[in-house]
Amino acid sequence: MEENNEFSLKNSNKSSENTFSDSFDVEDGISHVCIQLEKQDQPQVTFLERVKMTAEKHLTCSPSCFKKVIFDIFPVLQWLPNYKFREYIIGDIMSGIVVGIISVPQSIAYSLLASVDPIYGLYASFFPCIIYFLFGTSRHTSIGIFAVLCLMIGQVVDQELQEAGYDLSVNTSNIHRYSNTEKLEYEMVSNLSTPFPTLVSNNCDRSCYAIRIAANITFLAGVYQVVMSILQLGFISVYLSEPLLSGFVTGSSITILTSQAKYLLGLPIPRYKGIGALVMNWVSIFKMIPNTNICDLVTSIICFLVMVPIKEMNIRYKHKMKTPFPIELLVVIVATLISHYVNLQERYGSNITGTISTGFQVPRLPEWNLVQSVAADTVSIAIVSFVFTISLSEIFAKKHGYVVRANQEMLAIGCCNIIPSFFYSFATCATVTKTLLKDATGCMTQVSSLITAAVILLVLMVIAPLFHSLQNCVLATIIIVNLRGAFQKFFDTPRMWRVSHADALVWWVTMLASALLSTEVGLLVGICFAAVCILVRMQRPSIIQLGRVPDTKQYADLNLYRGLLCVSDVVIFRFNAPLYYVNKNYFQAAIFCKSGLNPTLKVKKNAKDKPEETENEDNGFSKCNTRKIGALVVDCSAMHFVDSPGADVLQELHQAYGRIGVLFLLANCSPTILETLQQSWILQAICK
């Protein structure tokens, strides 16, 4: 804190015209000076007039206003006409192709997490690229399949399948499907243990019902996000801190690893859901280990040995490589060829992807009965989707020097969910890996998303059936290898603990809750625990005693630094938080304790004819509190606001210390605090 040997009840801005001062010179003796300034007349506006002006501002429609609304909803209309073709096109094409190539194996792999067929993973990667091109404000964000989101969708899908009577332990990868009418037509197979009449009449098997559930989840998540965008709730994302999100992703990654372990070993184990599912899954895996498919196990080990070193090389030498080596695509191609020509399914019973159809399905409207059943579970999916999208967009916007609009981003991701849900897609959001890849390969605008969509379209129309013989264990390996970044967060926790104990605790609590309870409960627990940490820190903030640095006008913490000087007869404190009803009692008790002078006890002792000079208690400030106190100053530079109960406490302290001849003064008050004190009539009481 910088002072000119004066502490005053005044605006911290020395040049401000609106200044109230209650000051004294700390070296030449104590003086008490009050200055009253007359405020300028402000125009009086009634409530109805204010409502009328607001309505005219926001509801008046003119050609320019209509144009602005359209340009705000479709940001592509602003930047596309100014597209610098020669400067941008090469980077956009390169990044679009690379991201498209990486998206193909990841789309097929992550469909396992969502409990749907691989073709729908390709849909989920194709449609959002085009939609975000129209609605998004970020130039670098890649919208697509996110592992944690797929896991959350898959848990809801499995729950609804189980309630509908489907057997979750049966592998459906080899079911042949076809679609040539307006409804999805599937061959009925034995995986439906207790089929409902409605499902049989609609000729819908497990795979058909699973994608209907996922599509309805996606539609409802998009509706939630669009409604929040209309209500301007984009600010909600700031309440989910980075440690909370990091812990949530890591905890969910542990669940993802657990769900994919059965594919690595080729074990037919159902996915458990709810509290304790992680433990139950691992118990089932260890019980079934004797039944491990050796072919799947060997394939998984080989894939790990090939992919992990290449991935590490891509990271280590990313500055020397124009594009990272697409190891996932190479592994998928080689594994598919080996599985096809060696015939691993028939010879060794290896689980394969099965038939992947080409083209697109006929659009289908959401089903009201399914929307109702998944409405509650979809809330957390919608929150995770838009929070990760907004957070990632803002990170790259700051890096490249442009601005993203949180509410527009929420609208964009909502549209990326609503529209594809009619085409049998599932929920998507911004993906960290592919966004980093776009940035590293020279992406300049969202034109790269159109290139990515073109690559995925080529796969959808022509290449998809060629992945028929691809083993599920290869897809599981791809998923697990891409979780390395989340697991590496464990090594960051010591540094996080050194920086902030509260952030480290939030990370660990959220991670453990997400892994041991469930993803949805883990997110809720993390939010609640983070809120409790904030409340505790606000309720019991730090209050420090200040001393002057020798030969300067600077003041610092007496407990933290040596050689500081105590001002004669003056004790100076800084309260590092707003003063309001939650911490007002703590503030008062801390002032009494740290100053070693309780005016109430002092008055009582004087009333009983006890000696006036009492030795102050040693509260860690023995250098300064064993002397007579003439004035007590509170530096308010860290107080952002004071509410009415806090103002009452200040007045009580001023009066209590005044009765024993000690000045209680405030310094560096902000205009907001001055306004509150003036409205509370405390300034008038102090200046009398």
Image: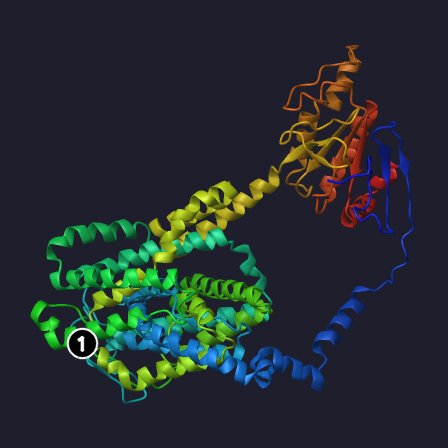
Q: Position of residue 486 (x, y in %)?
A: 38, 56
Which quadrant of the figure contains the C terminus? top right
Which quadrant of the figure contains the N terminus? top right
Total marks shown come to 1
Q: Residue at x 90, y 58 (%)?
A: 41
Instruction: Left or right? Give the position of 40 relative to 104.
Output: right
> Can residue 619 be seen from the camera position used here?
yes
Q: Is residue 121 above or below residue 481?
A: below
- Residue 211 picture quarter: bottom left
> Can residue 482 be seen from the camera position used here?
no
Q: Position of residue 377 (x, y in %)?
A: 40, 62
- Residue 179 picture quarter: bottom left
Label 1 neighbour load within 10 Å: few <14, some 14-19, many 20+: some
* Colouring scheme, one of rainbow, by chain, secondary structure, one colour: rainbow
Instruction: Left or right? Give the position of 125 relative to 202.
Output: right
Q: Residue at x 91, y 48 (%)?
A: 37
Extreme-left residue of the structure: 347
Relative depth, front residue between 158 and 81:
81
Extreme-front residue of the structure: 320
Relative depth, front residue between 514 and 307:
307
Residue identifier under label 1? 337
Q: Is residue 302 above or below residue 88?
A: above
Q: Position of residue 86 (x, y in %)?
A: 53, 84
Instruction: Left or right? Give the position of 44 relative to 213.
Output: right
**SS at mark 1?**
helix
Q: Amino acid at mark 1?
A: Leu
Q: Position of residue 125 (x, y in %)?
A: 38, 75
